[in-house]
Image (spheres, grey):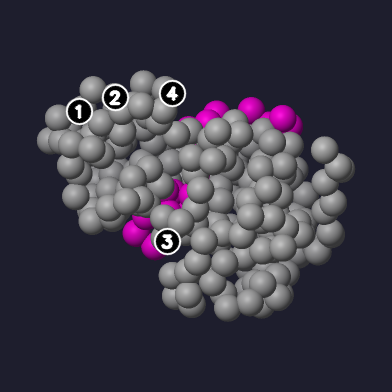
């Protein structure tokens, strides 16, 4: 494989970490053009950033060194932790998102993401269940990278978790507790409607139907995920 090319596009929006890196959080830019997103991520007034952005042609831009904390997750929660920026690497994928014409992620973009992701996982101890979308850690606010993101493909390349087979279905009445066991923030631990959390779970792990309702299929998928952890 050819050596991965990364273009330096520094952002001033970062500070010191306060926790070891053990998460990878994926986003879409949600802006009309990639150039607009790059400008915003590097604008000191915006006070947002990510470690990397990957354009649709596969170009990788580095904004913040991995040793520093980038400002990408905002108010968020996973597995009892709220300081998600402090312990994560954030990658933005250029895509207009749900507001401006959401579309499938480009093949060169995903190829670059897999190469970059493998390098990140080689450098940091990030468990598969801690490779997440922005909507997983902030379900009340975010929908990215969304239901068109190829999570199963990434998992096949060793990045993230995807159930290879359904588990024995959980009782859907205990679904909220199982979501919390996997890592999602559910009431009363967080002030987020349970329906929003289930919707985020479906966007990631059952994108064929996104209705915020925990059914038997969702329960079987979640059981398989918990078993795989």
Is residue 172 or residue 13 the one in the foreground?
172
Task: Give how far apart the Cα atoms at labels 1 and 3 are.
Answer: 27 Å
- Dot 4 surroundings within 10 Å: few (below 14), some, or many (20 or more)? few
Task: Give how far apart the Cα atoms at labels 4 and 1 are.
Answer: 16 Å
Q: Which residue is mark 4?
A: 229
Task: Give how far apart the Cα atoms at labels 3 and 2 are.
Answer: 28 Å
Range of magenta residues:
122-142
Marking on residue 88: none
Task: Give how far apart the Cα atoms at labels 3 and 4 are.
Answer: 25 Å
Is residue 11 or residue 17 the one in the foreground?
11
Marking on residue 170: 1
Task: Give how far apart the Cα atoms at labels 2 and 4 are.
Answer: 13 Å
Q: x, y (%) of residue 152?
A: 48, 40
Q: Residue at x 23, y 53 (%)?
A: 212
Q: x, y (%) of residue 194?
A: 23, 50
Q: Is residue 40 visible?
A: no
- Position of residue 221 in the picture relative to residue 61 (left or right): left
| Closer to viewer: mark 1 or mark 3 | 1
- Dot 2 surroundings within 10 Å: few (below 14), some, or many (20 or more)? some
Q: Earlier in the sequence, mark 1 or mark 3?
A: 3
- Position of residue 227 in the picture relative to residue 54 (left or right): left
Q: Quadrant of the N terminus?
A: top right
Q: Which residue is mark 2?
A: 167
Q: Which residue is mark 3?
A: 142
Q: Quadrant of the C terminus?
A: top left
């Amino acid at each position: 494989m050819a050596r991965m090319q990364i273009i330096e596009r520094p952002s001033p929006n970062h500070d010191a970490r306060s926790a070891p890196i053990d998460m990878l959080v994926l986003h879409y830019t949600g802006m009309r053009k990639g150039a607009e997103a790059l400008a915003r991520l590097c604008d000191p007034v915006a006070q947002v950033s990510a470690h990397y952005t990957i354009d649709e042609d596969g170009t990788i831009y580095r904004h913040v060194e991995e040793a520093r904390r980038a400002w990408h997750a905002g108010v968020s929660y996973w597995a009892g932790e709220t300081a998600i920026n402090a312990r994560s690497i954030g990658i933005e994928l250029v895509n207009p998102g749900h507001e401006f014409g959401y579309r499938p992620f480009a093949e060169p973009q995903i190829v670059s993401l897999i190469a970059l992701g493998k390098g990140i996982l080689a450098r940091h101890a990030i468990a598969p269940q801690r490779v997440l979308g922005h909507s997983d850690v902030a379900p009340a606010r975010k929908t990215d990278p969304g239901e068109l993101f190829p999570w199963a493909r990434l998992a096949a390349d060793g990045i993230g978790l995807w159930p290879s087979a359904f588990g024995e279905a959980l009782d859907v009445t205990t679904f909220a507790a199982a979501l919390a066991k996997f890592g999602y923030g559910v009431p009363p631990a967080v002030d987020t409607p349970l329906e929003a959390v289930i919707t985020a779970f479906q966007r990631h792990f059952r994108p064929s139907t996104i209705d915020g309702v925990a059914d038997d299929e969702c329960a079987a998928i979640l059981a398989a995920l918990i078993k795989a952890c």
